[in-house]
Image: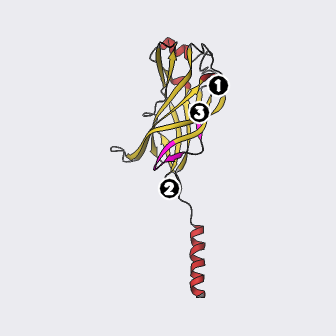
Amino acid sequence: MQKLNAAIVALASGLVSLPALAADSYTIDPGHTHPSYEISHFGWSIQRGRFDKVSGKITLDRAGKTGSADVTIDATSLSTGVAKLDEHLKSEDFFNVAKYPTLTFRASKIVFNGDAPGSVPGEFTMLGVTKPATLTVERFSCGMHPMLKKEVCGAEATVTIKRSDFGMTKYVPNLGDDVRLEINIEAFKD
């Protein structure tokens, strides 16, 4: 009986000392990640723009059903397809890219819905102002990239913010205060 108890204690001690499974780390693929936005233009139409440069890391702990995100969007890469509008949007009236060249989203947890991420509560920073924001993950999948032979995960995440909360008040309310941000993202496993 003493030998059995000693074996159980040794086994339990060994299990306690085992390292926890680490989360998988992924690097954002800037060639397939293009955050975009939608905003009401005087109630007549929805205007869209996108950012062509983004970087960051995502971690996924699928066993623990959590993770983290650190995404940096280069505000100077804003593109609407209209050069004069891009110039105005990059000015002090809106994104003020000379003073605030980046937008960031950081989250220390990912909330799973079943086996897939469902939301990412974190903090969004724009124009030097940081506010809570929760991305809703609308699509998520992972698999082996057929050409690069590396695991890649992709998702589409959205959030609606009030731009005035970040100090971007030019033309509110005629130019919508609510801005829908959409981040279509692909990231390769490190």
- Quarter of the figure with residue 100: top right
Which residue was labeled with disc 1? Answer: 165
- Quarter of the figure with residue 29: top left
- Residue projecting furthest to the bottom: 1
Which residue was labeled with disc 3? Answer: 104
Q: Which mark is residue 63?
A: 2
In this image, 184 relative to 134: left or right?
left
Kindly identify the amino acid type of the residue bearing the numbered disc 2.
Ala
Residue 61 horizontal/vertical position (percent): 52, 52
Q: Are marks 2 and 3 in contact (CB under 8 Å)?
A: no
Residue lying at 54% horizontally and 47% vertically, measured from the top left? 67
Q: Residues within 10 Å of mark 1 (few under 14, many from 20)?
A: some
Residue lying at 54% horizontally and 14% vertically, measured from the top left? 87
Magenta-colored span: 104-118
Residue 131 horizontal/vertical position (percent): 64, 32
In this image, 184 relative to 176: left or right?
left
**Vertical order, 161 against 170 (above or below):** below
Q: Are marks 2 and 1 in contact (CB under 8 Å)?
A: no
Kindly identify the amino acid type of the residue bearing the numbered disc 1.
Asp
Q: Main secondary structure of the magenta part?
A: strand
Q: Residues within 10 Å of mark 3 (few under 14, many from 20)?
A: some
**Vertical order, 34 against 10 (above or below):** above
Scheme of colours in the image: secondary structure
The front one of 118 and 189 is: 118
Does 113 lie within the magenta span? yes
Residue 178 horizontal/vertical position (percent): 56, 23
Which of labels 1 and 3 is toward the front?
1
Residue lying at 60% horizontally and 78% vertically, measured from the top left? 9
Does 143 lie within the magenta span? no
The front one of 80 and 5 is: 5
- The secondary structure type at the circle numbered 3 is strand
The Cα atoms of the two marked residues, 2 and 1, are separated by: 36 Å
